[in-house]
Image: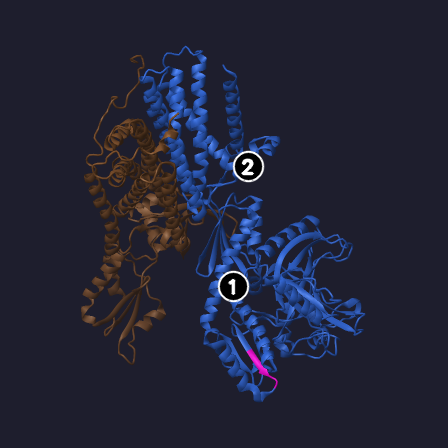
Chain colours: A brown, B blue
Amino acid sequence: MSDHHKFRYLLPPGNNFNFVSKFRSWMIVSIILMAVAIGSLFVNNAVRGTYMNWTIDFKGGTELIYYFQDTPGHYVPVDAGKVREALAKAGEDGVEISDNGWKDDKGVEVPGLMVRSPRFSALKPESEKAATEGFNAKFKDRDIDKATWSGDHLFVRSKKAISHDEAVEVFKTAGLDLKPWSADEQTQYAHADEGTQEFTQVFSMWGLDRQFSNVLDQALGVKSTAYNSYGVGAKAGDKLRDDAAKSIIYAIFLIMLYLAFRFDIRYAPGAAFATIHDAIMVIGVFAITWTDVSLTSVAGLLTVMGYSVNDTVIVFDRIRENQAKLKDKKIERIVDISINEMLVRTILTSSTVFATTLIMNIFGTGLVKNFAFAMNIGVIVGTYSSIFLAAPLFMWISKKWYSGPGTAKRRPAPQLAQTAEE
Amino acid sequence: MDRSLKWRFIALLGVLVFCTATLASSVVGKSALPSWFNGLFSKQIILGLDLQGGMHIVYTIDLDKAVDDKATELKRDFEARLTEKGFKAVVKTPAVPLGALSVVPDDPSKRAEIENQLTTDYGKDELTSRDCTPADGANAICFKVSQNFADTVKKSALANAVTTIRDRINEKGVADPSVVEKGDDIIVELPGDPDDPVIAETKDIIARTAKLEFKVVDDCGQPDPKGCTTGSADHNGSPYMKSLYGKVGSGKKGVATDPAALADEIKAETDGWKPEQSGTQHRDYYLFAYDRDESIPVEEAKLVGCLRRDSVITNGKTQCSVTGRHVIERYINGVVAKNGTVIRAGLVQSDPSFKIPDDHQLGFELNEPQLGAKDQRKFWRTYYLERAVRLTGTGVSNAYGNIDPQTNRPVVLIDFNRYGGRVFGDITTEIVGMKLATILDDKVKSAPLINQAITGGRASITMGSSEASVAERERDELINVLKTGSLPAPLHEESSSKLGATLGADSIQKTKLSFAIGILLVVIIMVGIYRWSGWIAVFAVVFHIIMTLAVMAIFGATLTLPGIAAIVLSIGMEVDGNILIYERIRDELLLGKSVRGAIDLGFSRAFSAILDGQLTTAAAGWVLLQYGSGPIKGFAVMLLVGVFTTLTTNIWVTRIFFDWTVARKKGQLATISI
């Protein structure tokens, strides 16, 4: 009757998809995926040593301040983006770069850069392992009693001495750069302990500052010098982690409480489950893809949860309305009709948010990219969970507890729903 | 156009103009705007460290001082305990080794008993025995603060320092600083323009130890190991100062007779008084010396911190301005490099009797020249102080500023807490007729004569500077530091650098670009589907962003990356709200409702969904704000602001445009572009 309204449709009107009939399958798939997500944390812990790829925010690391010179005494500014690129190419994860300027002793402005890396030493676990293995293999004939790493130093106790020159080669194949021995060290290491007749020798690697410096010199074509480098503790300590966990749990409870009062109690578990599901999925994807987890990722996670709750509540709102309107229909139909009615809106909203954050993911760098990545995953799982998990879970709870077998219509639809009507 | 719509439209315009004006100074900078405008809209968006950068300052903290203070505290504790048990002994805190204590019993036969008592009372956790040195005296029982306990003291001092620094920055009103420990150092990051005077002032306040101490000025003629009190027989000046006075000499016009002192313009003087109550003659011998510019050896220049890379060095000497304090210390103790080499000999090197006794120290007071005095240089005078700290800043409960009606100088009034008031009362009772030195950060601020016991629980510190504005700033700083408490140990600024946005300047540029493209995509999607109504939604998004930022600026919240994340979320929810409304209007139109009726119904039906969505978000935001910290808090604040602006734009702003579209056609509208 209203053909004169010429709407542009995203979907042809009157869509009628079946969402809830396959509820059990969706639920099983989701639970399996959640298990995989959680499992991936433990896999990471077993394989890589930590649950997630924590950045310097969470585990601390090293802050290095560099300045750059094209000719001695002449400072040149260097684009932070290029440094980030160069270090990323060299396989450095979770590096953050920012400008850092100061005045030198002569009062000349020095345009420097601060590099924050989650690494504490020049050694990566894999290179440490490779070096130890190579070392033990090469010097089998020296009767090595003990070879242990401490920071950038390898402490070796052996029956026969190992010369510096011999060791250099071994470390080089493992990608490590050995520091020369000082005169004192040379004499000290050349003599065996009188009691045990063992040689104690220390092989020290060049630190992170030199390693990064080498990478930067090659990539930028100017001389980089580490002005300062020091280890820093985690910015986000245990307190922040506990606060975050506590506040998220409280927030979910408060949302459940709100839904229980404003809708009714059947809605609450669905929303909570969907939100937790989305959070776990995002965490899982971060864990599996070994993406950096910084404070910004935490903000991303909160955003995903906020989005998910909002999406779910709006679908619930329609179900509530339809429950009052379509009293003679079965609850499955009501949920299906509601989701179908909301489908255009759901797709439109999620696609605008997805498009915006996808652009941020493509064009953004560093932390912003990280946030956008969390959002991209979050929008997909958030939309999925509202339609396929939250609403059907509500339906399931309604059927299970609100209507026994054979008394399908014993309880009327909740009267609260009337408030939505005029 | 009906009246209500007209007024709503005017209100919308007003809000928009107000918000834009609020943001103007943040966008183009205050300098580009007239001053009356800046006066009206003074609030600016505060950007966090991640977006704006700021100052990066590294402080080292002298944690040994904290251990030293612990030893002093134990000394007082020892004294109380020994008195309680009926032992008579003198407790001292020698300067070396770190955290040393020695107890010399009056009756040597009681030595073992006292040692036993103290070791059982304190146990191995706090104290360990150490070998006595000749300086400890015969029969001394020697302790030092145990290594473990010293480490604990250092650790808690460091944590305490971090909290105090954070408090001071907050008191100053610099938002969202970052204060972290790094080994024994503390790194402070202050967001904001490093050239802003507020940043410089904040830096000053941070480094103030604000160690307030009260020590007794010793004028007793007989060395009294238990301290000089009113009851002591002879107040004719301490033997040490008397001999120092004699050495320097006071010739014509008070000029020194000792050539070394004369060369450095050090003068010796006395100060005498006779309190009415006791009638005892008091005499205080002291030295004073001017701040001066002189050529000093390079090693010495290094020690006083005046050697710079561009310093001109001739014959191993360089030009420096040295304080009178340094001049006097040098005259007595000589200049000794850290490795023990004597760079310049002082009195101590030739005559060990000029070594200041272990339980005493020299306090220095900076004096401004009096108006009209011939010599307009600043000078320092000495006080012969007991080493024991009688009361510290922990006894202070509050501090506030005032003007001394007599001298017209700014003063800081200190209220003591109950403990402080009692101790202060005890001290002043003990030393009526003598002087009590108020020492702030190792400088004697004042050493007034105690005419009678002060039991009112209040004291005052007069600001030294003669220039009113400087004195007032000094006073405000002092109040800040006294309120936030003193640092457990002195801080030294090791380095200070300008920090760019921690996010990276390039990153911010790219983020801006992607934000713009993102908005463009929203325009394409919304206008593509909803045509004219899509434009309304786009306007709503723009309004939403402007209003969110303006509200944030007005409340003085700091914008950080997590905050931007929350803004992105709230924009998403706002667009969602518009989509909900539009879909409802379409539904109603399809049911054959009139345009006007469809709009009315569309808004009212969508309202409950929008409200529920926003209220759940608000509930979550509120919880995050209550329990979260750092970035979580930043996120929560913006989320709550977003809830407010989303509801406003969805329900109010969008509605105005639809009503306007209908009103334009005077109700004859058959369909709308949606």
**SS assignment for the magenta stretch, majority:** strand
Q: Does residue A26 sit above or below B451 in this rendering?
A: above
Q: Secondary structure at mark 1?
A: loop
The C terminus of chain A - image quarter: top left
Residue B13 is left or right of residue B654, and the answer is right
Q: Does residue B216 sit above or below B573 in this rendering?
A: below
Q: Nearer the viewer, residue B655 or A145?
A: B655
Mark 1: which amino acid?
A: Asp
- Is residue B116 a member of the stretch shown in magenta? no
- Is residue B104 a member of the stretch shown in magenta? yes
- Rendered image: mark on residue B62: 1
Residue matched to label 2: B43
Q: Distance between the Cα atoms at labels 1 and 2? A: 39 Å
In the rendered image, which quarter is residue B489 located in?
bottom right
- The residue range painted magenta reads B102-106
Q: Residue at x 64, y 50 (%)?
A: B473
